Amino acid sequence: MALTVLIAMALTILLPHHTGEWLRYMLAALEGALLVAMVIGDPGAIDRRSDAMRRLSICLVAVMIFTAFGSTVDLIYRLISGNGVANDAGELLQAGGTVWVLNVIAFAFAYWEFDRGGAAARAHNLQIAPDFAFPQHLDPEVSPADWRPMFVDYLYLAFTSATAFSPTDAMPLTGRAKLAMMLQASISLVVLGLVIARAVNVFS
């Protein structure tokens, strides 16, 4: 989880310069500060149940979602208007790839945070209805008895949702999970479609 946050910080700084240097560095610094606070408050496994840790985790997810959505809207605007990176195929592909990965990471953290009440609640096996059914839930014979999804499972879920535009191994069970996956697939489809179409147009 911490490594993914560091990657998101680096990608935030690498966003196109027209997004504003001060904003990019401020968002990356805020993500880093929240990560440090979470590590200090709960070093090692993320299994400490406290209101403060829960709020820190939600704030981190909110910052990542704000960064991902903001960069997505800015990229779509420039693609439609033909400004900035839209006129350079190389910069356009770099910006599109950065925005796409940021969205994958943001949704991975969102899924990780709201499924069954968050990581700490899952670690304590609280009886909260799941938002996602993983293969290990559907067939207990393929996993240990105490198995629970870790962050990498939600990262894979977000990646497959952004590439396949549909559920693959994990199935959404609740309305909010289905809406979140639908939103992520829509964003990914729009970003990839517009970036590829514009890049082909610039190359030609």
Image (cartoon, rainbow, N blue to C red):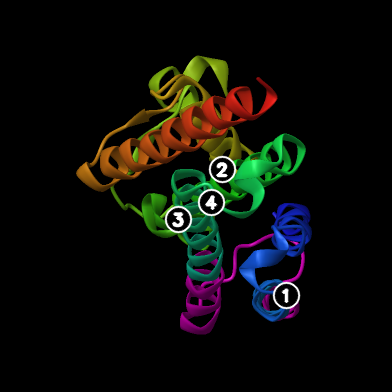
Q: Disc 3 residue type?
A: Val
Whether the residues at callouts 1 and 2 have beta carbons within 8 Å, the answer is no
Which residue is the site of mark 2? 104
Which residue is the site of mark 4? 75
**Regarding mark 1 in the picture, which secondary structure is present there?**
helix
- Disc with the residue nearer the chain's start (1 vs 2): 1
Q: Disc 4 residue type?
A: Leu
Q: Is residue 118 above or below residue 51?
A: above
Q: Position of residue 103 (x, y in %)?
A: 54, 47
- Judge left or right: residue 33 versus residue 140: right
Look at discs 3 and 2 and give the one toward the viewer.
3
The quarter of the displayed image where residue 159 is located = top right
In the drawing, what numbered circle is on residue 21?
1
Which span is picked out in magenta?
36-61
Q: Is residue 199 above or below residue 181?
A: above
Q: Position of residue 200 (x, y in %)?
A: 61, 22
Q: Is residue 110 magenta?
A: no
- Give the spatial CA distance, label 1 vs label 2: 23 Å
- Give the spatial CA distance, label 4 vs label 3: 5 Å
Q: Residue furthest front?
A: 204
Q: Disc 1 residue type?
A: Glu
Q: Disc 2 residue type?
A: Val
Which residue is the site of mark 3? 73
**Regarding mark 3 in the picture, which secondary structure is present there?**
helix
- Disc with the residue nearer the chain's start (3 vs 2): 3
Q: Is residue 54 magenta?
A: yes
Q: Is residue 87 above or below residue 70?
A: above
- Judge left or right: residue 165 versus residue 84: left
